[in-house]
Image (cartoon, rainbow, N blue to C red):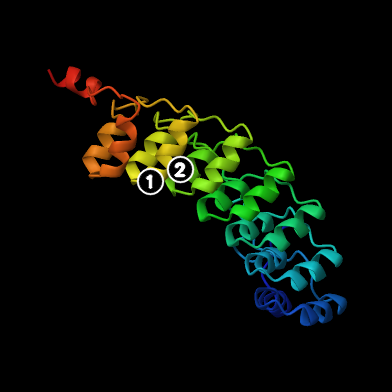
Amino acid sequence: MSMKKESPWDVELHLSAARGDSKRLQVLLESGRVHVDCKDKDGTTPLILAAAGGHVEAVTELLQQGADPNAKRLTSTTALFFAAQGGFLDVVNLLIDHGATVDSCSIDGGTPLFVACQCGHLDVVVSMIERGANANAHMKDGATALFIAAQNGHVRILEVLLEQGAKTDAARTDGATPLWIAAQMGHDHAVRRLLKAGAKVDTTRHDGATPLFKAAHKGHTAVIGELLKYRPSLGILPVIFRVSK
């Protein structure tokens, strides 16, 4: 539905959803004075607010009243995106049961699976993959769910994604891989797991920087130790060195 100027009834419905007040939601919706999918200036619906707060009863009430589980904000984020971000497994499953698109993308290409990986919500990640989420989907910059998990050091999530066939060396548009970003961030356990899964130790970003270079530059000694077990090249910035000559 198109956005219009919010009425006092719209505002009250939004506030009730944000508070998780399912009884007040029912009263307001049954009054006929407000639409279940009324939007604010950012395109946010009551269902999105209730899902973002993890309010299961409010989400249930809104869905029963006909709320669109795939309604999007101006950023193209949905109720499922925010439920996944918050780690609200019950809400995630409820939304999917009512037709929420599992791999719905935000304007930057991020999916609910991405934010669950970013925030470390293992149970949500497992459930979403079981419900059909694509483990190899990527954002506009090429980052995959595996990249996001590696960036944040969530090893158990890495393992789940790898078990589901996530591509170990899938690179961002700048050439950085999950191993590269894990090395830069100092996540030695993630580095160890990725190397064990077959990640290429000498993968380079487009500027020529290797995982070993980034680990050394940042002073991540534990990461350096893990990388050295796989005999990386010690010519850690060949491209830059050639250009500078």
Residue 14's image quarter? bottom right
**Viewer can see residue 225:** yes
Q: In the image, 229: left or right of 77?
A: left
Q: Are marks 1 and 2 in contact (CB under 8 Å)?
A: yes
Residue 73's image quarter? bottom right
**Viewer can see residue 108:** no
The residue positioned 52% from the left and 56% from the top of the image is 119
Task: Please state which amino acid type lies under the numbered disc 2.
Answer: Ala
Task: Please state which amino acid type lies under the numbered disc 1.
Answer: His
Numbered disc in front, either 1 or 2: 1
The residue positioned 71% from the left and 46% from the top of the image is 102
Q: Residues within 10 Å of mark 2 (few under 14, many from 20)?
A: many
Q: Is residue 7 above or below residue 151?
A: below
- Looking at the image, how many numbered discs can be counted on the residues? 2
Q: Which mark is residue 150?
A: 2
Q: Residues within 10 Å of mark 1 (few under 14, many from 20)?
A: many
Q: Which mark is residue 84?
A: none
Q: Is residue 112 above or below residue 135?
A: below
The residue nearer to you, when weighing 66 against 245, is 245
Query: Which residue corresponds to mark 1?
Result: 187
The residue nearer to you, when weighing 187 against 102, is 187
Q: Position of residue 66 (x, y in %)?
A: 85, 63
| Element assignment for label 2 | helix
Furthest residue in direction front, as rendered: 229
Q: In the image, 59: left or right of 126?
A: right
Q: Earlier in the sequence, mark 1 or mark 2?
A: 2
| Element assignment for label 1 | loop
Cα–Cα gap, marks 1 and 2: 8 Å
Q: Is residue 151 above or below residue 61?
A: above
Q: In the image, 116: left or right of 192?
A: right
